[in-house]
Amino acid sequence: MPKASDIMTKEVITVTKETPIRELARILLEKNINGVPVVDDENTVIGVVCDSDLVEFNKPLHIPTVFVILDSVIPLENPWRLHKDFKRIAATKVGDIYSQPATIVNPDTDVAEIARIMSETKYYTIPVEEDGKLVGVIGKVDIVRSLAFS
């Protein structure tokens, strides 16, 4: 059974929380990739940002339904959703939109297990770490490639 180390991309492109969203979009387009790990100052993976995060960033603001009773405004939805939506539309950096924590595998993880993780979590950019160091990344295309050439 193939392992993560057999299919991972070893030249990993990363971004930080301070990377501007426009730069992230250019990186994803120019490198023809769907996502990248987000790293801190010590190059430790703290999350992942994907093209789906950029799509979410661009969706319109949802105005919550409320009702008024005795001069009180009562939201019919979770007020934290509105807070999250305002934060999303005001985003300028990767730190405002990335997913955390990252789902990380090690080089010995079976490809079948990685496919299961992707399928169940809907995370399609999986960093590969060995001894706390980022050594690779696996995307959907790597899984498909492993099927086509095995």
Image (cartoon, rainbow, N blue to C red):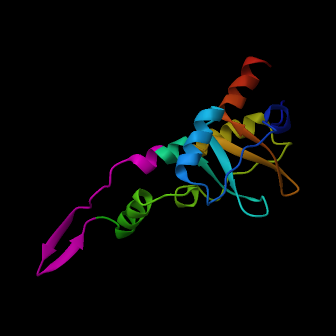
Horizontally, is 49 left or right of 109 in the view?
Answer: left
* Residue at position x 12%, y 81% in the image: 71
Going 83% across and 30% down the picture, which residue do you hit?
2
Judge by depth and name the residue closer to the eye, 130 or 9.
9
Q: Name the quarter where the N terminus is drawn.
A: top right
Left/right of residue 143 with respect to residue 133 in the rendered view: left
The image quadrant of residue 34 is top right
The answer to whether any part of residue 74 appears in the image is: yes
| Residue 50, visible in the rendered structure | no
Where residue 89 appears, as percent x and y from the top left, is: 40, 57
Q: Quadrant of residue 44?
A: bottom right
Query: What span is colored magenta in the figure?
Result: 55-76
Q: Is residue 75 magenta?
A: yes
Expressed as whole percent of the image width and height from the top left, the position of residue 149 reads 78, 18
What percent of the width, then of the height, locates residue 87? 43, 63
Question: In the rendering, at what x and y percent does residue 6 appear?
Answer: 85, 32
Tell me, yes or no, whether the highlighted magenta stretch contains residue 4: no
Q: Quadrant of residue 72?
A: bottom left
Residue at image location 61% in from the left, 55% down from the top: 19
Looking at the image, which is closer to me, 106 or 116? Answer: 106
Position of the C terminus, as image quadrant, is top right
- The residue closer to the viewer here, 47 or 116, is 47
What is the residue that sits farthest to the left in this orientation? 70
In the rendered image, the vertical position of residue 70 relative to residue 90, given as above or below: below
